[in-house]
Image (spheres, rainbow, N blue to C red):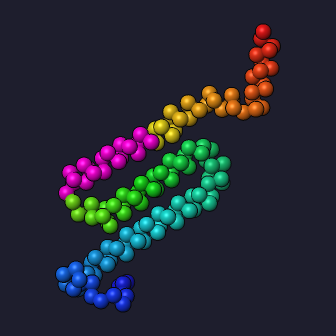
């Protein structure tokens, strides 16, 4: 499928021949279709999450991890294609993407392990129903 619009000669503006222009447009359309498919998968997972969660016995944390994964894949593909990082050599890509990858792993760890364990102790204290139960429990032990 060839992409056509009324814009005058991409090839002349980009200073390459028509064959190279066809390749560039084909690459852009491939990126578009890939991002569309990933977005549709995200929407499907979000739409049917309640059913998936019950049938597979998953927690809300898995939903967060799935959406973080899809977001990172889309962001990485956009950076590689539209910001031309995919055209750089391997070491330059890792130098730019490595710190982001470590930061994302850190965020996932913080959301799933640290924040969940930290807030678990405060959930009972802030919940009025369990607060009453704790105070009654404390009175019985005195």
**As drawn, 108 above or below 33:** above
Horizontal side of residue 26 vs 139, given as left or right: left
At which x and y percent is residue 62? 54, 46
The quadrant of the image that shows the N terminus is bottom left
**As drawn, 106 above or below 75:** above
At which x and y percent is residue 69? 45, 52
The quadrant of the image that shows the C terminus is top right
Please name the residue shown 30% across and 89% down the image: 8
Residue 103 colored in magenta in the image: yes
Between 29 and 1, the one lying in front of the other is: 29
At which x and y percent is residue 125? 68, 28
Horizontal side of residue 140 vs 117, given as left or right: right
At which x and y percent is residue 35? 43, 66
Occupied quadrant, residue 61: top right
Please name the residue shown 65% across and 53% down the image: 50
Q: Which secondary structure is most common in the magenta stretch?
A: helix
- Magenta region, residue range: 89-107
């Amino acid at each position: 499928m060839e992409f056509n619009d009324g814009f005058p000669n991409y090839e002349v503006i980009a200073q390459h021949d028509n064959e190279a222009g066809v390749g560039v447009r084909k690459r852009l359309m491939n990126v578009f279709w890939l991002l569309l498919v990933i977005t549709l998968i995200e929407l499907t997972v979000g739409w049917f999450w309640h059913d998936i969660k019950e049938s597979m016995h998953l927690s809300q944390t898995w939903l967060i991890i799935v959406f973080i994964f899809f977001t990172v894949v889309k962001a990485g593909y956009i950076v590689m294609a539209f910001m031309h990082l995919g055209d750089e050599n391997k070491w330059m890509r890792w130098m730019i993407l490595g710190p982001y990858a470590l930061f994302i792993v850190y965020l996932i760890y913080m959301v799933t392990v640290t924040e969940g364990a930290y807030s678990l102790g405060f959930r009972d204290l802030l919940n009025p129903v369990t607060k009453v139960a704790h105070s009654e429990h404390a009175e019985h032990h005195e």
